Each structure stands twice: as structure tokens, then as C-alpha cells.
Image (cartoon, helix red, strand yellow):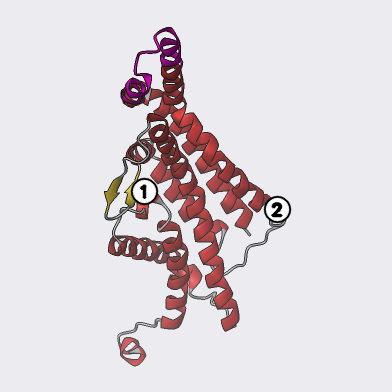
Amino acid sequence: MDKLAEQFGINIDYYAVLIAWGLIFTRTFTMLILTPFLGGRGIPGRVRMMTAIVLATFVFYFMNDDLVNKIPADKGIIIILFFKEIFVGLALGITTIMVFYAIEAGGRIVDTQRGSANAQVFLPALGQVSIFGLFQFWLGLAIFCYFGGHVIFLKAFLEGFITIPIFSLPHVAAGISPFLELFIRMSAEVLIFGMQIAAPVLIAIFLTDLVLGIANKMAPQIPVFEIGFMMKGYVGVVMTWISITVVASQMEVFFGIMQTNVQKVIHYFGV
């Protein structure tokens, strides 16, 4: 193959090309499988694989001249670089998915307070899912794309190949502590964001329980339990639609925090 290519004046180092493209693909694929707007749970595996291949090839095409001449001679270093790309891709993917998990958690909290936590839907691609959790998740995804969050994320991801070169090991000047602190804080924010998303419905259901409790004291013969179960179901649905604009604006704030965290992760790994 090499001799045939040389006859046509084509000189390609297939080994260097394969290693460089493989490193780019490794970071891209590990990021993509965790990013809901590129390769989330509901997207078939073949589609995710092809998306990663196309995106990796796109990046390799524009960085080809700078990459093929920087292949390390040591095979052990190359293996370490592959593990580094896996870690970087997972860090970016987890940073992104945390916010969407928080939004979904808010929907699950609403379902629990409505008394319909067991009324889950089975989807072949997702398994057992909460009705309001799934609704909030897709609502957040739509809002994220509407405000151009996917474009901003892809721009930061592509610029990350300059900040974090594939043939360089990261120089973590401040140590690993700031990186771990960031992920611990993001884990704590999942519950906080979820409670903020569910807050309007939780307040409405609390007031409903309060009114029913007062009514039960005034007229004990009223079947409060049966009425409350029905009323909280309706109150949850109605309040969700009434507060959808407030929730959407709050989601925009969450996505801004997510973009900041992505930039911080890239900065921590930057050389």
C-alpha cells in the first residue's frame, strides 16, 4: 500500500495518522456517550459511534499537519496518552450531564410529592423512567439547544484540543485538589438544582396539604386522604405548567454554571 501511494506521489505515515486520530476519537467518544444532546441514553449506539467518528475526523482534518509529526517514540507514553484522553473525555461528559441529572431529579421529586412515584413509564432505550423526570429532562434539553448551549459547548470542546494537546500530559500546577473540589461541588449542586426546579410544585402541594389538614380538623368526616391524593395530582400538573417560564429561566442559569464548569475543567487540564 505504501509503495502504491508513493508511485502517485502520496506520502502518508499511516501509523502516525492512526495514533493521532485514535487519540482524538477516544476523547470525543468518551465525552459523547455522557453528553445528552450529542449521544445521550435515548440515542442508538450506532448513531453515537458514527457521530463520534465524524466529529473526530473533523477535528483531525484541521489539526493533521500539527499532529502527525509529534508521535512519541515510546509505546508506553502512547498508552498513557490514551488513558489521559479517556479521563479528559469523561471529565467533560460528567460536567455536562450533572446539570441534566439535576433537572431530571427535580421532576422525580415532583412525582414523589404528587404521590405518583410508582407510576413510571418503561421505555426500551431508557428503562423505567419517571413521567415528570423525563418531561423535565427533555424540556431542559430543548431549552439548552434553544439558547445555543450546544454550540457553546462544542466550541469549548474543540478549543480544548488546543488547550489540552493530545500528545501532551496535563500539567496540574495546583494539584488534584481543585479538580476534586469542583466535582464534589457539582455533585452537591445536583440536589440543590433539583429542589429549585421542583420548588413551585412543592410549595403548592404543601399549601394543599395545609388546607386539607385544616379542613379535616373542622370536618373530620371528610375523606381527606382520598381527596388529597386526587388534588395533589392535579395541583402538581397545573402548577408545573404555570411555573414553566420561571423554571425555564432558572434552567438557563444552570446551563451558564455548567459552561463555566466546563471551562474550569479544561483549564485544570491545560498545559
Q: At 37% across and 60% down in the image, what residue appears? A: 55
Q: Is residue 192 left or right of residue 176?
A: left
Q: Are marks 1 and 2 in contact (CB under 8 Å)?
A: no
Asked whether residue 230 is drawn in magenta, I would say yes
- Residue 162 locus on image (x, y percent): 53, 58
**Which residue in the rendered view is the most extreme toward the front?**
221
**Picture quarter containing residue 1?**
bottom left
Amino acid marked by disc 2: Ser
Q: Amino acid at mark 1?
A: Phe
Q: Which mark is residue 218?
A: none
Residue 40's place in the image compared with 241, above or below, is below
Q: Residue furthest top?
A: 218
- Is residue 193 toward the left or the right of residue 171 in the image? left
Q: Percent x, y for residue 75?
A: 56, 83
User: Label 1, on which residue?
Assistant: 37
The one of 164 and 51 positioned closer to us in this rendering: 51
Residue at 46 percent of width and 69 percent of height: 65
Magenta stretch contains residue 267 = no
**Residue 177 circle label:** 2
Q: Is residue 158 visible?
A: yes
Q: Earlier in the sequence, mark 1 or mark 2?
A: 1
Main SS, magenta region, reads helix
Return the residue nearer the eye: 261 or 106: 106
Quarter residue 150 falls in: top left
Residue 13 as seen in the image, left or right of residue 231: right
SS at circle 2? helix
Residue 24 percent location from the top left of the image: 45, 66
For the magenta stretch, what is the residue range?
210-232
- In the rendered image of this protein, does residue 70 appear above or below residue 143? below
Q: Residue at x 39, y 39 (%)?
A: 144
Q: How many marks?
A: 2
At x 45% / y 40%, what residue is drawn? 105
